[in-house]
Amino acid sequence: MNSRSKYRTKQREILLQYFESVSGRHITVWDVCEYFRERGEAIAQATIYRQIESFVNEGILNKYTVDNGSPACFEYVGEQSHVDSNICIHCKCEKCGKLTHLRGDEFEQMFYRIYGEELFRLDPIRTVLYGLCKECAGGTEENV
């Protein structure tokens, strides 16, 4: 049994399958509760909170708190978290609230350059750019 293994309860497995199915998306606790409520699954909100915290502690989910006006959101990362690059800029749509990631070498270089030249260390998990997502901007590149 590896250090990441936990008791395999039915609810834990159901929640884990759900997060795997929404991989690449940012999900709030409300989203999880609503998903299971719509399907008639009886999972208590306290259980959802407890399991999500457990997944975060195990490194299965990443937790993001972008700003004071937004609830924490979670992203399924499974066995591979953001170890390949600790630099991850978030973009938050001011209209619909959608949160997306920008990753890549150019952002990592930018973070290190800012720190090296300006002597300012940005928080790579809480750095957020605000604007409009492609859908809210009308779906065309020139509006984004």
Image: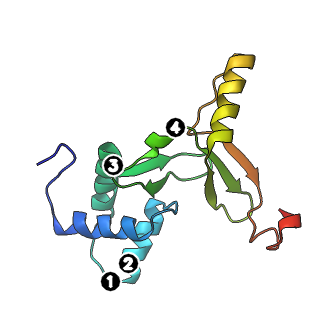
Residue 58, image x, y percentages = 29, 45
Question: Cα distance, mark 4 to mark 2?
Answer: 35 Å
Badge 2 amino acid: Arg
**Circle 2 Cα neighbour tier, 10 Å, few/some/many (<14 / 14–19 / ≥20):** few
- Tell whether label 1 touches label 2 (CB within 8 Å): yes
User: Mark 4 vs mark 3: which is more N-terminal?
Assistant: 3
User: Mark 3 vs mark 1: which is more N-terminal?
Assistant: 1
Label disc, if present, on residue 58 of the rendered structure: none
Residue 128 occupies quadrant: top right
Badge 4 amino acid: Asn
Quick check: 65 above or below 121? below
Residue 11, image x, y percentages = 22, 67
Q: Which residue lies furthest to the left in this view?
A: 1
Q: Which residue lies furthest to the front in this view?
A: 105
Question: Cα distance, mark 3 to mark 2?
Answer: 20 Å
Badge 1 amino acid: Gly
- Tell whether label 1 touches label 4 (CB within 8 Å): no
Identify the secondary structure beneath mark 1: loop
Residue denoted by label 4: 86
Label disc, if present, on residue 37 of the rendered structure: 2
Q: Nearer the viewer, mark 3 or mark 1?
A: 3
Residue denoted by label 3: 53
Residue denoted by label 1: 40
Query: In terms of depth relative to the viewer, which is nearer, 74 or 31?
Result: 74
